[in-house]
Amino acid sequence: MGLKEKIESIRSEMNAFKVASAEELETFRIRFLGSKNVIKDLYREMKEVPKEMRKDFGQLINALKNESEEAFTSFKNQVGSDQSGGASEKIDLSRPGEEFPLGSRHPLSLVRNEIIEIFSRIGFNVSEGPEIEDDWHNFSALNFPPEHPARDMQDTFFIEKGENEMALRTHTSSVQVRVMENSQPPIRTISPGRVYRNEAISARAHCFFHQVEGLYIDKDVSFADLKQTLQYFAQELFGKKAKIRLRPSYFPFTEPSAEVDVSCTLCNGKGCNVCKYTGWLEILGCGMVDPAVLKSSGIDPHTYSGFAFGMGIERIAQLKYRVGDLRLYSENDIRFLDQFKSAY
């Protein structure tokens, strides 16, 4: 069979080819356009053609190649527009595409951002500091006595003991010390961040958690200012009907000190299993800054006074979202995190 007959034979085969599926389309591509397709063999046979005829045969082969490419494009369009293998059912290009799964903000981030937003509206700025702290900023400057239990190995993650003692911070009050050392009143700041305690991990406790601590120092700051600030915070976070109560407590860096409870928003203070039928839920600790803490940071306690407060973000998130197990916050279970997509 001569070269011209071979060209016509391949053309006839190509014209007779029927494509109704992706598999058949791939068969056509391999046969006529693949790396070892039948048209390439024709170019190799051009060596046997007399020189004066090569141009004409070259044009015939090129035309065949162009026909195969056009046929493949046509078949491809036909297969792509036919979902069931036939040409009757077309793709509706106006339909929306398939939705991509979106991530969600972590519930602790949602609560942290909400707390920051609430306090920013009354003039508090955000301060941050290192998570690895020395003894001065973590304990001594905050009036912790040498024998305080927090200094023991069973309560604190120490990185280095001895003269240059370093530990993972146990609270973000260390940030407040740095702010007082490097600025002068008036000071109005909150310090959100991660803290560490050497505790057994359970549904109610973890070895790391998150806090937001606040500090306000100025002339003539009173306990009444503290109570008003916390009342405002509770109502902004839990609703206008929220009430607070303060119970006497003890913290080394504040005097007087108090624990703050908020009226249970689930039962409106009537009593339920969440608030243990008391009508109240504990949310934070607070107090007036001890004059010794002011003096340690270079602030005159005779001229200035202030208050401080601190809360666990996990605790607030548990009350807000009714999460019963602290471990869920750090396990990165997508099923748990997906519940908070609608929260922002």
Image: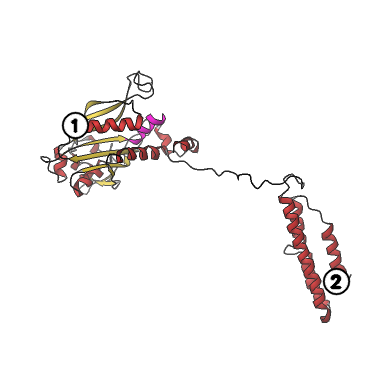
Say if 147 sits above or below 33 in the image: above
Relative side of 18 to 304, left or right: right
Q: Which mark is residue 223?
A: 1
Q: Nearer the viewer, residue 213 or 251?
A: 213
Per the image, the residue denoted by label 2 is: 3
Q: Residue 43's spot in the image, x, y percent?
A: 78, 72
In the rendered image, which quarter contains the C terminus? top left
Q: Quadrant of residue 16?
A: bottom right
For this rendering, which residue is in front, 133 or 303? 303
Labelled pair 2, 1 in contact (Cβ < 8 Å): no
Q: Amino acid at mark 2?
A: Leu
* Magenta-colored stretch includes residue 314: yes
Pointer 1: residues within 10 angstroms few (<14), some, or many (20+)? some
Q: In the depicted view, which residue is nearer to us: 185 or 196?
A: 185
Q: Label 1 amino acid?
A: Phe
Instruction: Tell me the SS state at disc 2.
Output: helix
Displayed quadrant of residue 265: top left
Image side of residue 165 versus residue 7, left or right: left
Residue 110 percent across, percent down from the top left: 40, 38
Q: Is 292 a magenta residue?
A: no
In the image, farthest residue toward the right: 1
Choose between 17 and 27: the one closer to the eye: 17
Can residue 92 be spotted in the picture? yes
Residue at the front extreme, as displayed: 94
Magenta extent: 312-322
How busy is the neighbourhood of tag 2: few (under 14 within 10 Å), some, or many (20 plus)?
A: some
Q: Is residue 77 left or right of residue 152?
A: right
In the rendered image, residue 334, in percent from the top left (x then y), is placed at: 49, 38
* Count of numbered circles on the image: 2
Main SS of the magenta part reads helix
Image quadrant occupied by the N terminus: bottom right
